[in-house]
């Protein structure tokens, strides 16, 4: 039986989740864009802070903080279910997209000098963070 997770308010958590069977779905630019769109909609729907989002070929990870810590499972559930439904519909697929429940652990976001793509004081803008991940730090931003 799984251990009950207890989340505290105003605490940073490192969240990571992988794609089912380790498929490199996020290697496709259209899939990355779809995930970023769902991430933005999640931010509009729920109140939380998100820092250092990283989209890898087979999963995602980021730092998350909510004023009400109990919201974390609800937010993650909505985000993963919405992405999975849209992904399956767009690519005419069926079945699971996400491989597991995900890893959530208490952690502080890395400081700006530790290779992070932003400062501790300001949350990173999702689109810019993903572009940095894709193109490198000196890449120009889209307009």
Image: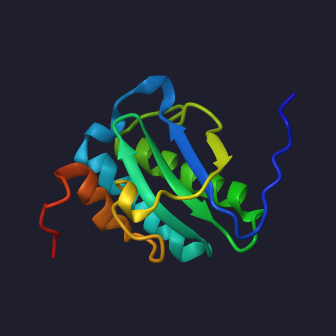
**Where is 6 relative to 19, above or below?**
below
User: Residue at 24% of width from left, 59% of height from top?
Assistant: 131
In this rendering, position of residue 58 left or right of residue 80: left
**Position of the N terminus by quadrant:** top right
**Where is 48 relative to 129, above or below?**
below
- Name which quarter of the figure residue 70 lies in: bottom right
Say which of 66 and 121 sits in front: 121
Percent of width and height locating residue 41: 48, 69
Percent of width and height locating residue 29: 24, 47
User: Residue at 53% of width from left, 31% of height from top?
Assistant: 95
Question: In this figure, what is the number of numbered marks?
Answer: 0
Farthest top residue? 21
In this rendering, position of residue 18 left or right of residue 47: left
Percent of width and height locating residue 111: 45, 61
Say which of 8 and 34 sits in front: 8
- Name which quarter of the figure residue 63 lies in: bottom right
Residue 42 appears in the rendering: no
- Name which quarter of the figure residue 127 lies in: bottom left
């Amino acid at each position: 039986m799984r251990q009950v997770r207890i989340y505290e308010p105003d605490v940073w958590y490192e969240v990571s989740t992988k794609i089912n069977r380790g498929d490199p779905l996020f290697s496709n630019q259209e899939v990355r864009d779809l995930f970023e769109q769902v991430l933005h909609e999640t931010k509009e729907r729920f109140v939380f802070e998100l820092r250092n989002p990283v989209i890898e070929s087979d999963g995602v990870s980021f730092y998350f903080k909510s004023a009400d810590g109990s919201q974390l499972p609800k937010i993650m559930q909505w985000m993963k279910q919405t992405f999975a439904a849209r992904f399956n519909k767009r690519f005419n697929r069926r079945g699971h997209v996400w491989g597991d429940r995900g890893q959530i652990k208490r952690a502080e976001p890395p400081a700006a000098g530790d290779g992070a793509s932003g400062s501790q004081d300001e949350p990173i803008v999702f689109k810019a963070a993903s572009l940095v991940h894709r193109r490198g730090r000196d890449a120009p931003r889209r307009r």
